[in-house]
Amino acid sequence: QVRLVESGGGSMQAGGSLRLSCTVSGRTFTINRMGWFRQAPGKEREHVARITRNGGSTWYADSVKGRFSISTDDTKNVLYLQIDSLKPEDTALYYCAVGYTNVRYDIYGQGTQVTVSS
């Protein structure tokens, strides 16, 4: 079983930057895809970024393209989400997820809160 623990959230001013981390443990060799989601109060969950296990392919939601960057450190089994030019609308619970295949996510973390004030 794979376990995910997010960290790095907090309260920030608009315009700043933040890097979220997701530490992955367990049977990491079974992972095919890794991604980040966010959910703001009263809104549906939004898939914001995805990366393949070998880091060869990334995808971003249009709403975050150009400001978010997903990456991995395979030596440490950590997934990152760099967020630049923070906006108040980035306020949400951010959580990572992994999938054993390339068609869905199977394991989700508990999330880390990001709050951006103007």
Image: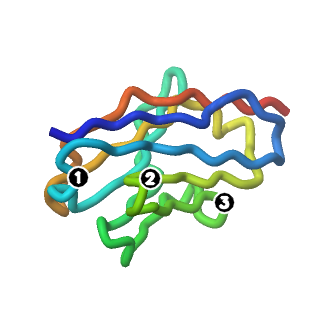
Q: CA distance from mark 1 to mark 3?
A: 28 Å
Which residue is disc 2 drawn over? 79
Labelled pair 1, 3 in contact (Cβ < 8 Å): no
In the displayed structure, 23 sits above or below 115; it is below
Labelled pair 2, 3 in contact (Cβ < 8 Å): no
Q: Amino acid at mark 2?
A: Leu
Residue drawn at (83%, 36%) of the image: 13
Q: Secondary structure at mark 1?
A: helix
How many neighbours does mark 3 have within 10 angstroms: few (below 14), some (14-19), or many (20 or more)?
A: few
The percent position of residue 35, horizontal first and vertical second, equals: 38, 52
User: Residue 28 — which label?
Assistant: 1
Q: Secondary structure at mark 3?
A: loop
**For marks 2 and 3 on the same chain, the one whose residue lies earlier in the sequence:** 3
The percent position of residue 99, horizontal first and vertical second, equals: 21, 52
Q: Nearer the viewer, mark 1 or mark 2?
A: 1
The percent position of residue 74, horizontal first and vertical second, equals: 38, 62
Horizontally, residue 105 falls left or right of residue 19, namely: left
Relative depth, front residue between 25 and 100: 25
Q: CA distance from mark 1 to mark 2?
A: 12 Å
Residue drawn at (30%, 65%) of the image: 53
Q: Amino acid at mark 3?
A: Arg
**For marks 1 and 2 on the same chain, the one whose residue lies earlier in the sequence:** 1
Horizontally, residue 13 falls left or right of residue 21, namely: right
Which residue is disc 3 drawn over? 67
